[in-house]
Image: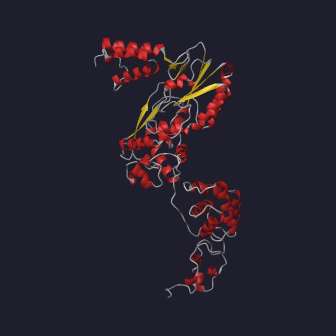
Amino acid sequence: MEFPGEAADARDASTSPGSPRDTQDQHDDTPRAGERAPRATPHGGTDGSPGNPTPLSVVASALADAFLTADRWAVDELTAAGYAVVGVERAYVGRAVSAALDAYPRPPADAPRQLAGVLAANPRLAALHRSREARRPVRVLARRATAVRARPVTDSPLLVDTLPELARALDVTVGRLLWLADTRAWNRHAPAGSPLHHLRHEWVVRPGRVPRLLEKPMDLLRRTQRTVLDGLLTRLPVHDAAHGFVPGRSVVTGAAVHTGQQVVLTADLTTFFATVSAPTVYGVFRSAGFAEPLAHVLTGLCTHRVPPHVLARMPAGGTPEERAALREALAVAHLPQGAPTSPALANTALRHLDARLAGWASAAGGRYTRYADDLTFSGDDRLAARSEAFLRGVERIVADQGHRLNPHKTRVRRRGTRQSVTGVVVNDLPSPGRREVDRLHAVLHNCVVHGPASQDRTGHPDFRAHLLGRIGWVEQVHPGRARRLREEFARIRW
């Protein structure tokens, strides 16, 4: 049966847009076929030119998807899968197959985009693609794809293959999960007060210093992030030098490493959470075994872009350079200070930095620990003799890892002076500073005599809990002194 207006040979012609030029399918045998030429050869021009070539990235993506559908990760199976996508292009598919097998001994079922990037970056394949663009471009004739799968490298109930499975594990619907993740940052441009915002923002003014932004997730996002923390992040390894936000470690365990040393060096990372970017967080989830799509969603769930109206309200403080750097870091996806997942993700993301700094300290005969953004080094006379050069090396390593040191907080404390690590004095034994304990005891005594309101000079929302927290910190370091402070606290009339 022939349809009205149909060319006589159109029924037998190939429907593939990638048919080679100058084949029988593309000959203008009749006037009517000549009139239909622009539609019959959508990739070529009416003047006989090859038309717009398909970008290498598109071809590489199609080949990567096709390779992952092969029954076996071997030359013959991958070649057949490649022919199904671009046709019988022996040299082209052969180079793509060689690039895939050279890069991956096993099929990267969790990383089709990464495989596509490897193919597109192969110089031999790229050169062949360029040489074919003007004469006979390689085109995608069909697309084949298979479901991505996680790598079972982490013992976690959240390590699943598909988005619906992840949503069930997090106890939310797929729609709510995608809304919370907001991977395209649509919610960022919602007006102030909009229910589309998932975090509350609070600027903390610090006199003489750049202000700090607290980014507090709302209830649904906080509960979902807490599930990610408990079900996954607490199971990921961290470096031995990390003592902050790690079960079984504390400021005391970190400070005890540096007890009785000739010199103690301390430094501070600037805008600690804000400088841990989304690509770094994505790498954490990929290393945990998640396939690319789920790692992308989890990254959106645990990172945040600060809306413009919040950045516009930044209070005064800091130098123009520091303010610009903070504004730039907060405007892109980063770990929000205030999310339950941020400390654990930061510890995991900084494993490479910790390993490099630990190696640098060991080479100088020293020791290294990190509590959140506080870096501490200590050692004997060898480190004391070259402390300035050592700190320059620390600064280079930190910068190479994408972070910056706060130049105002770097300290060199030698034997004979008060050596303090995260508030713990480490000259001989870990102990709380005498001045801090005496000051706290005076506050407690004045609360007993004059009432707690007389000592709450900064307007703490829960002054009682604030005092108990300070006593608890002393208790971690010196239980005997804390006992006397608790006795004084018990005399306060609330």
Q: In this view, does 29 lie above or below 119?
A: below
- Which of 227/143 is in front? 227
x and y, in percent, of residue 19 in the image: 62, 74
Rendered image quadrant of residue 56: bottom right
x and y, in percent, of residue 207 in the image: 47, 24
Q: In this view, does 57 lie above or below 89?
A: above
In the displayed structure image, the side of residue 476 where residue 416 appears, left or right: right
x and y, in percent, of residue 452 in the image: 32, 17
Rendered image quadrant of residue 394: top right
The answer to whether residue 53 shows anywhere in this view is no
Q: Which residue is drawn at 45% across and 16% down?
A: 436
x and y, in percent, of residue 208 in the image: 50, 24
Q: Residue at x 55, y 15 (%)?
A: 428
In the displayed structure image, the side of residue 17 where residue 331 appears, left or right: left
- Which of 449/6 is in front? 449
- In the rendered image, the residue lying farthest to the left is 493
Q: In this view, does 300 lie above or below 348?
A: below
The answer to whether residue 288 shows anywhere in this view is yes
- Which of 451/75 is in front? 75
The number of callouts visible is: 0
Of the 4 image quadrants, the one containing the C terminus is top left
